[in-house]
Amino acid sequence: MSVTPLKLSESLTVDEAAATLRAAQAAIDAGCREVDIGGLETVDSAAVATLLAIRRYAAAKGVELRISPPPPALESLIGLYEVGDLLGVAVQ
């Protein structure tokens, strides 16, 4: 059974963090194994924290979650916080 990736687009800031985490948890519970973050345009440090929380949730469920390559603004934050390995994404 193929489950559509969870697609995050436009914004992931402190304002969207809680709702995004809940949506990701529900998607993982429904069988989702991939999060597509390529469409994010507006991000802040809450985006990094939310992605880490999503990864932790998946790991606790025994799920290997794939996160697509980040857009440039998010790649900068992931690099700044040095969490690329934790998120499973490569940053420059």
Image (cartoon, rainbow, N blue to C red):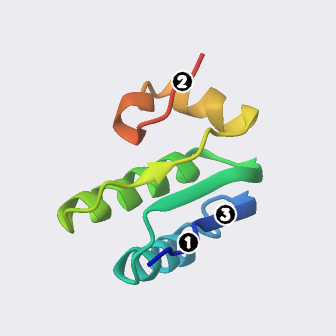
Residue 63: quarter of image = bottom left
Q: Dots 1 and 3: beta carbons under 8 Å?
A: yes
Q: Position of residue 42 (x, y in %)?
A: 77, 51
**Is 54 rendered above or below residue 89?**
below
Q: Nearer the viewer, mark 3 or mark 2?
A: 3
Q: Amino acid at mark 2?
A: Gly
Residue 8, label in figure: 3
The residue at which mark 1 appears reads as 20
- The residue under the point 65% across, 58% down is 13
Query: Between marks 1 and 3, how big is the CA–CA gap?
Result: 8 Å
Of residues 20 and 8, the one nearer the viewer is 8
Circle 1 — which element?
Answer: helix
Q: CA distance from mark 3 to mark 2?
A: 20 Å
Question: N-terminal of the two: label 3 or label 2?
Answer: 3
Residue at x 67% of width, y 63% of height: 8
Identify residue for label 2.
79
Left/right placement of residue 60 relative to residue 43 reads left
What is the quadrant of the N terminus in the image? bottom left
Q: Secondary structure at mark 2?
A: helix
Instruction: Inspect the image, locate mark 1, and give the three-letter code of the amino acid beneath it.
Output: Thr
Label 2 or label 1, whichever comes before in sequence order: 1
Q: Earlier in the sequence, mark 1 or mark 3?
A: 3
Residue 50, horizontal then vertical, whole percent: 47, 57
Q: Give the percent coordinates (x, y) of residue 54.
A: 40, 61
